[in-house]
Image (spheres, rainbow, N blue to C red):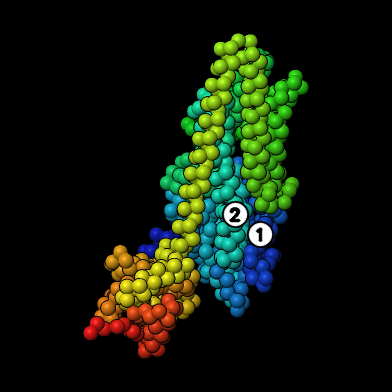
Amino acid sequence: MSFRVALLCLILVLAMPAVAAVPPVPADWGTAAFRIGAGADHVEMDRGLLAYDAGSGAWLQLADGIPNFGYTDRERWLAFRIAPEGENGHEALLAISYPLLDEIELYTVVAGLPVSVGRAGDREPFARRPLVHRHFLFPLAPPAAEPTVYLLRVRTSSSLQVPLSLWDANPYFRAETDRYAFYGFFYGAMVLVVLYNAFLFAVLRERVHLAFVAHTGSFLGLMAGLQGLGYQYLWPNWPWLQEKAPAVFVAAATGSAFVFAHDLLGLRERSPRCSRLFRAGMYAGAACLAAACLLPYAQAMRPVLVTAVLGAGVIAWGGLRQWRDGGRSARWFIAAWLTFLLGTFLMITSKFGLLPRTFITENGPLFGLAAEAALLSLALAGRYREHKTARRAAQAEVLRMQQEANRVLKQEVQLRTAEMQNMMRLLAQANEESEQRNHTDGLTGSYNRRAFDDRLDLEFGRALRESKPVAMLMVDIDHFKNFNDTYGHLVGDECLEAVAMTIEHAARRTTDFVARYGGEEFAVIIPDATPDRLAGFGERVRQAVADMEFLVEGRRVPVTVSVGGGALTPAPSDAPEELIRLADGALYRAKHAGRNRVETEVRVNVPS
């Protein structure tokens, strides 16, 4: 027996325990394979899935709907097939849109044996995911002539739901861009509301504002955790927090809701018996919060949910009672609380399949929270007006109290003025940041075409006034279309970023201006450039890109550029486009002369 054969046998023996843990491939499917294309950019995989039954050792077809196994710590295996896509290939993504799964492993079957495709889960740091995204995404290789079989292992300590969908990659990320824009707007607005009430608490020192901040902030944290946004942006290196986030934030939101309702409704003065009940709710929320931090998630979540459901009912009952007794703030509070519960109810019913899973039902708590925040702000305003009316009535009795009221009113005016100035400052800062983004290329981080046009007009005008030369380089990545076809657009984007960074490093002077001209082309404006310096600069850029260590799957892939340079001493009849024409013509010659070279065209006045 040769050494290679012995080594192969040893590897197979070592691999047997891992393979043995995978259930056998199902023999008879009885369902069609999933596919994308033919006008569809994705398919919801909520039917036609097989689940492995360890008791019988057989694969059983799941009922229609999103697979939901309830609260269990047992692992589950699912099987499905992806059909060939014919001549129109798609870059397929398997999306699992439930960020609370602890362990996920995906296998493909090759020659009857499972081969690992990837693994993920919220028990691992976020950076280890196959694709950086709030959901679990697995790129799938294009199927061959026959359907490809996949096996999926999932396990979690929370509710085991597996919402699967198969996507064409480009439409998926376009759709996610719109969702991220919505989430950015919503969370940004809600953070402003939270900061505003935190500011009110710092000024007024009223506990109701602090309770509002805690309740709204806790629910924002809960939704960010459920949507995977918290793990992606706030705590990507803390898997333990991602696992405990639902229980922790639900408990915190429950306890702070009791505090807020107690103070807003004025239960201490209006209803001492109801006040004692609400204080018990506060203590129950605090106990659940401690349990959520100290106990395993599966043990803590059930009492937390029970407390939250009972607490929601008790708070609604207390608000209705105060409304009946004539409390003006209670009507706004009840409207806000019922709106919030309605949004949460929409999401829960969609999880159980009673309502279709849509953008509105999935984000029902967000809409409910936004409406709740607006209505609770009205409740706080109504409460403030009640206090203000009572204070003015008391101030009418004595002159000293009237003067005190005027002082308080002046403070309120100053507060509103400071708030308006702060909002104007934030608006100006936002406008400045927006202007900066409008001049920056979103992919490479270099300046974009708009910034290039502005800078070219500036440098061309300066050169015309001072009768000095101005030059530019046009840099084009060689055979970039073939590069994208070979390695994919994601790798192509990484290549564009690497080339842009390399060109910027080659541009050593602070006056040299690098921009992405479009597609795979970059432009460099070089003020006061002599013909020799222009050619040398172009050669330095070409050589730097050729020496670039660009790796694809651990293997260096050569990248080259063709460089065309143009230099011009402007005449009054010249336009900036003349300089672009010179550089573009030189680039054309460089391409047709074999690429990976530098060509220049110069129209510079030589001093006599």
Position of residue 1 relative to residue 443, above or below, is: below
**Direction from residue 442 to residue 474 in the image, left or right:** left
Name the mark nearer the viewer: 2 or 1: 2
Label 1: state its secondary structure.
Answer: strand
Can you say which quadrant of the picture contains the C terminus?
bottom left
Amino acid type at image mark 1:
Glu
Residue 243 rendering spot, x and y as whole percentages: 50, 42
Give percent across and percent down for residue 341.
69, 36
Where 258 sits versus 371, above or below?
Answer: above
Q: Which residue is mark 2?
A: 179
How busy is the neighbourhood of tag 2: few (under 14 within 10 Å), some, or many (20 plus)?
Answer: few
Residue 235 placement (x, y as % from top left): 45, 44
- Label pair 2/1, CB-CB below 8 angstroms: no
Q: Residue at x 55, y 17 (%)?
A: 404
180 left or right of 337 in image: left
Q: Is residue 1 left or right of residue 300?
A: left
Would you place residue 496 above or below residue 564 in this image? above
Q: Nearer the viewer, residue 196 or 228?
A: 196
Image coordinates of residue 362 in percent, x first then y, are 65, 48
**What amino acid is labelled 2 in the image?**
Arg
247 left or right, relative to 349? left
Label drawn at residue 44 = 1
Identify the residue shown where x is 61% and y is 62%. 166
Q: Say which element carries label 2.
A: helix
